[in-house]
Image (cartoon, rainbow, N blue to C red):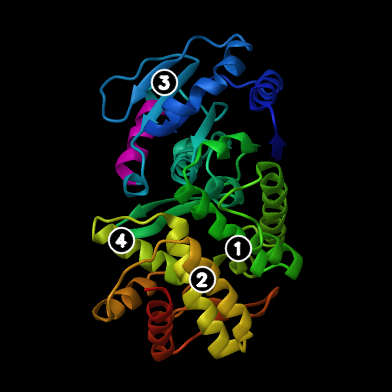
């Protein structure tokens, strides 16, 4: 269930009143604990919940309470098994059962990690996501994918596990800095590309520098509906849901390389770079119109910071792509396009073309 609302306090209060759980745990990171949890306090107090107890990752004993907050370190570099273990410890010490509710408040890192912790604790408890970034709203919190990074690889460990509810209040987006807004917007560009011309050009012509948040809310609703259409058709990514991976084979490699350098880039920045590379491959392999490749490249060049890499790192990036979850028979499988909405999954591409796509990115972005 996805709820779009302009009053998150009222919606959450009503949800808690009608869905009874033996314990409630609220997961956030150090940023959303400070900026977002205070906005939700009335929803809990209005339902007879006890005052907030808290536990900070790595901070000793966990207070026991029907309403316990768990605070983890912010940033995708901390989306790790160590922090999952801290969440598990808190749930265990807090007496969580399969009838307990874990509310994940934050960006994609929080919903991914919290979703994985909730999916695996006692083989699954109840989840409610409250995404607070554009990336989480249009991508991470919707669709039931959970995961953590492992051995320097993006989302290497994870599970499919649908939350009971995703509660979206786009007023949170007004607190984002421009770079984080752009990060989520890369997923909206992707959703437009795999859907239809109107959805794509509505996103590409929107004034992202001076956003009209009422209009952005409308675009967000369309973007979520596009993703949900693919998820409902193929919930465990056996086929057409792989359309949602456009830009991500290269994008995850760029992101993993940035982790190894200890200079992390935002997920959407890496995906934007990945879109350019994979649209180039679409042009070479699937005859994607060059005009579309140029339009997307120019948009990304205008607004997104470059992902910097040298030709000496091509082999390393290719090696990282070999770990992509969509691969079969030890061969890289791309999701490519023949045109807007013409999705081609399971595309095998020569190594020389992949390296050409890196050249194309560097020649046009640097």
Give the image location of residue 235, x and y in percent: 64, 57
Residue at image point 61% right, 34% down: 171
Instruction: Count all numbered tags in the image, as a single digit.
Output: 4
Q: Please say if 32 is above or below 66.
A: below
Q: Name the N-terminal-most of marks 2 and 4.
A: 4
Q: Secondary structure at mark 1?
A: helix
Residue at image location 33% in from the left, 39% down from the top: 83
The Cα–Cα distance between marks 2 and 4, rounded to whole angstroms, is 17 Å
Relative side of 327 to 168, left or right: left
Residue 291 visible here: yes
First in residue order: circle 1 vs circle 4: 1
The N terminus sits in image quarter: top right
Residue 94 image label = 3
State the mark number for residue 189: 1
Residue visible at 32% across and 68% down in the picture: 308
Looking at the picture, does residue 23 appear above or below residue 140?
above
In the rendering, at what x and y percent does residue 186 appear? 54, 60
What SS does tag 4 mark? helix
Mark 4 neighbour density, 10 Å: few (under 14) some (14–19) many (20 or more) = many
Sequence-wise first label, 2 or 1: 1
In the image, which residues are magenta? 80-91
Q: Which residue has dot 4 on it? A: 258
Q: Could you tell me how far apart the alpha carbons at marks 3 and 2 are, in whole angstroms?
A: 43 Å
Q: Is residue 82 magenta?
A: yes
> Is label 3 or label 2 in front?
2
Near mark 3 (Cα within 10 A), the count class, few <14, some 14-19 or many ≥20, is some
Image point (63%, 12%), residue name: 47
């Amino acid at each position: 269930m996805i709820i779009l609302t302009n009053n998150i306090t009222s919606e959450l209060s009503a949800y808690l009143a009608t869905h009874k759980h033996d314990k409630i745990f609220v997961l956030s990171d150090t940023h959303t604990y400070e900026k977002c949890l205070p906005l939700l306090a009335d929803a809990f107090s209005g339902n007879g919940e006890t005052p907030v107890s808290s536990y900070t990752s790595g901070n000793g004993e966990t207070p026991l309470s029907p309403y316990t907050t768990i605070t983890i370190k912010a940033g995708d570099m901390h989306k790790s098994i160590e922090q999952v273990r801290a969440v598990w410890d808190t749930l265990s010490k807090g007496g969580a059962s399969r009838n307990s509710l874990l509310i994940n408040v934050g960006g994609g890192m929080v919903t991914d990690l919290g979703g994985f912790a909730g999916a695996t604790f006692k083989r699954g408890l109840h989840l409610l996501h409250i995404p607070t970034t554009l990336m989480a709203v249009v991508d991470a919190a919707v669709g039931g994918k959970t995961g953590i990074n492992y051995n320097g690889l993006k989302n290497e460990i994870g599970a499919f596990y649908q939350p009971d509810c995703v509660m979206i209040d786009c007023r949170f987006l007004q607190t984002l800095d421009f770079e984080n807004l752009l990060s989520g917007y890369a997923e909206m560009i992707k959703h437009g590309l795999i859907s239809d011309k109107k959805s794509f050009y509505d996103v590409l012509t929107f004034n992202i520098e001076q956003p009209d948040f009422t209009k952005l809310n409308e675009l967000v609703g369309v973007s979520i509906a596009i993703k949900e259409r693919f998820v409902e058709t193929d919930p465990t990514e056996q086929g057409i849901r792989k359309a949602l991976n456009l830009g991500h084979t290269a994008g995850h490699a760029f992101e993993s390389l940035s982790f190894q350098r200890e200079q992390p880039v935002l997920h959407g920045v890496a995906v934007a770079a990945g879109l350019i590379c994979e649209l180039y491959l679409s042009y070479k392999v699937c005859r994607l119109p060059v005009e579309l490749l140029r339009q997307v490249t120019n948009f990304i060049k205008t607004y997104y910071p470059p992902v910097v890499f040298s030709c000496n790192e091509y082999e390393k990036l290719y090696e990282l792509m070999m770990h992509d979850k969509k691969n079969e028979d030890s061969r890289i499988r791309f999701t490519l396009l023949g045109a807007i909405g013409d999705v081609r999954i399971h595309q095998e591409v020569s190594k020389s073309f992949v390296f050409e796509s890196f050249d194309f990115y560097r020649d046009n972005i640097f």
